[in-house]
Image: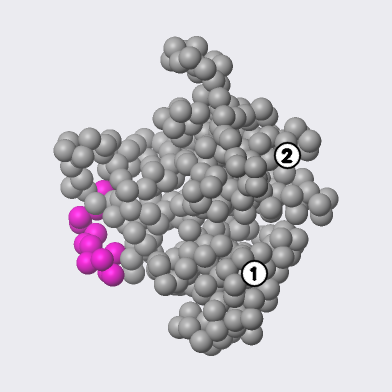
């Protein structure tokens, strides 16, 4: 089988949309295949990265905890769209995983380099 | 060269604009389902489409016809049928679906 | 070319599945092949064999089943999406002591690894979002 790279662009907020969790689960599943995989958080996807998520009252699993599994699968660094953070007044130190800031030009380049794009 | 598909109305969500933001020159955008409303003549999104060069815009005919917009699609849009959708996929190196 | 399709929308609730079905048929008509269809998230409702459509409407899950058997297409319902939405096969029905299974003919319940594998097996992967 050919060696193919995957890019997952994450642009949905957590909790209200189950595909937010699905996107992370897909990333974890891909690590078994030793494929090149990159994760980019953009749009409302950047809300997933907030460190202070507390879900005891909500009753759902903590999405932040799911994200914390990414480094255990060697899925780091993750990338985050600087403009999406700025639009939402989110500071880098409020985020989990110490993501690497990138701009839209870099994201376009990553898309051009990927064999398969999942834009979840 | 990437084929982007957009299935949300620009009047309902930011999806179309987010896609545009990350669509590189040489790539294409195919409007499907409610995405075709972005192609309606004399709207902010259609005006935007008409002002952009270097990106090709397409819209899916079945969705346009079903929604009664046959006569009202911006001239900057190329209308394709389902077979045309398949051709666009083969002509681009990958597909990114914005929903 | 070999295509794989990812379907994220439930039939009837969202247009995604109907769009994907038309795409699949158009691709086959043009002598391309569909390598795998992966039902993910609400897309797993497309594998519910108990779906009953009104006479003047298409039975979308049945259409997927027919397409799978007539063109030998591998169809997978994501296990983590399927079980929590009540889409189960015989094995899972036994394991969780449920009265019946409802997975469509031609569709298997399996993990997300099958979607990753689809990216390796296909020339293009197309997502049909909800």
Left or right placement of residue C40 versus residue C26 in this view: left
**Looking at the picture, how far across and down is residue A50, in whole percent?**
24, 51
Which residues lie in the magenta part?
A85-98
Check disc 2 and report its element: helix, strand or loop: helix
Q: Quadrant of residue A59?
A: top left
Q: CA distance from mark 2 to mark 1?
A: 26 Å
Do pointers 2 and 1 mark residues of a single chain?
no
Which labelled disc corresponds to residue C67? 2
Left or right placement of residue A118 versus residue A17 in this view: right
Looking at the rendered image, the quarter that the N terminus of chain A falls into is top right
Q: Label 2 lies in what chain? A: C
Q: Nearer the viewer, residue B37 or A49?
A: B37
Residue furthest out toward the front = C55
Which labelled disc corresponds to residue A108? none
Marks 2, 1: nearer the viewer: 1
Q: Is residue C85 above or below residue C11?
A: above
At a point 44% along the width and 12% down the height, the residue shown is C97
Q: Label 1 lies in what chain? A: B
Q: How many numbered dots are placed on residues in this image?
A: 2
Q: Residues within 10 Å of mark 2 (few under 14, many from 20)?
A: many
Q: Quadrant of residue A80?
A: bottom left
Q: Nearer the viewer, residue B98 or B83?
A: B83
**Looking at the picture, how far across and down is residue B61, in whole percent?**
67, 68
The residue to which callout 1 is attached is B65
Q: Nearer the viewer, residue B37 or C31?
A: B37
**Looking at the picture, how far across and down is residue C47, in whole percent?**
58, 34
**Looking at the picture, how far across and down is residue C68, in whole percent?**
72, 36
Q: Is residue C58 above or below residue B50?
A: above
Check disc 1 and report its element: helix, strand or loop: helix
- Residue A96 on the magenta span: yes
Left or right placement of residue A22 versus residue B91 in this view: left
């Amino acid at each position: 089988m050919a060696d193919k790279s995957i890019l997952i662009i994450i642009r949905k907020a957590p909790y209200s949309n189950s595909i937010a969790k699905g996107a992370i689960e897909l990333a974890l599943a891909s690590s078994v295949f030793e494929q090149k995989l990159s994760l980019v958080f953009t749009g409302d996807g950047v809300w997933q990265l907030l460190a202070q998520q507390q879900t005891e009252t909500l009753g759902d699993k903590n999405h932040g905890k799911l994200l914390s599994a990414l480094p255990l699968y060697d899925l780091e660094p993750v990338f985050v769209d600087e403009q999406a953070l700025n639009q939402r007044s989110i500071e880098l130190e409020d985020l989990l995983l110490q993501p690497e800031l990138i701009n839209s030009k870099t994201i376009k380049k990553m898309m051009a380099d990927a064999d398969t794009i999942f834009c979840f | 060269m990437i084929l982007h598909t957009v299935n949300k109305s620009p009047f309902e969500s930011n999806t179309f604009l987010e896609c545009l933001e990350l669509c590189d020159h040489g790539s294409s955008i195919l409007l499907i389902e409610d995405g075709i409303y972005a192609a309606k003549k004399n709207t902010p999104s259609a005006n935007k489409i008409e002002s952009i060069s270097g990106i090709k815009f397409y819209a899916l005919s079945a969705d346009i016809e079903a929604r009664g917009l046959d006569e009202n699609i911006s001239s900057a849009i190329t209308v394709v049928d389902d077979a045309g959708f398949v051709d666009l996929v083969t002509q681009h190196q990958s597909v990114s679906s914005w929903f | 070319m070999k295509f794989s399709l990812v379907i994220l929308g439930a039939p009837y609730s969202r247009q995604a599945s109907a769009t994907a079905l038309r795409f699949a048929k158009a691709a086959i008509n043009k002598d391309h092949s569909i390598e795998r269809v992966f039902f993910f998230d609400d897309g797993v409702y497309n594998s519910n064999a108990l779906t009953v459509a009104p006479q003047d409407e298409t039975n979308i899950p049945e259409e997927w089943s027919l397409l799978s058997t007539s063109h030998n297409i591998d169809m997978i319902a994501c296990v983590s999406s399927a079980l929590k939405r009540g889409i189960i096969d015989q094995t899972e029905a036994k394991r969780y002591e449920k009265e019946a299974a409802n997975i469509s003919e031609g569709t298997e319940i399996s993990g997300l690894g099958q979607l990753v594998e689809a990216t390796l097996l296909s020339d293009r992967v197309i997502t049909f979002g909800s």
